Image (tube, rainbow, N blue to C red):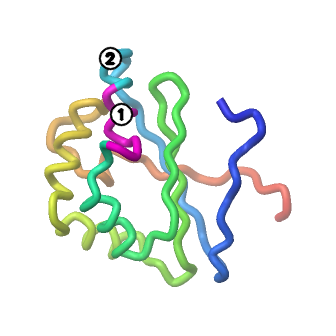
């Protein structure tokens, strides 16, 4: 656990942020395997390249027990729906979605958009 926080990137351009949540199946071994699937050694390069190719600048996933929280940073002109539709067509993306679905608490065959639920920002210190 990083009680010192996590350094964020400066992209040199204004960005916007999307936050989503998803639950994993409440099984310690499945959670271990899900974490492993996302480590540097096991994360599929095609998926990483696909994420970047649709315009996403950064993607982070945080975990607490079996709850995931994902942060996606993108340029201000980024269109979520268009990017996700394109991402779904890229090499190995459906294979990846099917694979990680075995760890996720979701309906069989659910799309990424159906599994990950967009969160609403309810507080911002500087607004």
Residue at 32 percent of width and 67 percent of height: 49
Foreground pick, 29 / 42: 42
Q: Residue furthest front?
A: 41
Q: Magenta segment, which residues? A: 33-41
**74 with respect to 23 (left or right):** right
Q: Nearer the viewer, residue 85 or 34?
A: 34
Residue 32, compared with residue 38, is above or below; it is above
Q: On residue 36, which mark appears?
A: 1
Where, by quadrant of the figure, is residue 9 drawn? bottom right
Q: Secondary structure at mark 2?
A: helix
Q: Position of residue 67 (x, y in %)?
A: 48, 30
Name the image quarter holding the N terminus: top right
How far from the left and from the top, in percent, is residue 64? 55, 28
Q: CA distance from mark 1 to mark 2?
A: 11 Å
Q: Which mark is in front, 1 or 2? A: 1
Which residue does the image show at 54% across and 54% down from the upper left? 71
Q: Earlier in the sequence, mark 1 or mark 2?
A: 2
Q: Residue at x 16, y 58 (%)?
A: 92
The residue beneath circle 2 is 29
Left or right of 88, for residue 42: right
Residue 36 in magenta stretch: yes
């Amino acid at each position: 656990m990083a009680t010192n926080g996590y350094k964020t990137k400066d992209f040199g351009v204004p960005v916007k942020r999307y936050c989503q949540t998803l639950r994993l199946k409440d099984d310690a071994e499945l959670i271990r395997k899900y974490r492993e699937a996302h480590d540097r050694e096991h994360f599929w390069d095609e998926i990483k390249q696909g994420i970047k190719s649709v315009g996403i600048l950064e993607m982070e996933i945080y975990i607490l027990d079996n709850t995931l929280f994902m942060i996606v940073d993108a340029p201000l002109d980024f269109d979520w729906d268009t990017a996700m539709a394109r991402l779904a067509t890229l090499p190995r993306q459906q294979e990846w979605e099917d694979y990680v679905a075995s760890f996720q608490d979701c309906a069989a065959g659910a799309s990424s958009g159906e599994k990950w639920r967009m969160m609403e920002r309810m507080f911002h210190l500087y607004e």
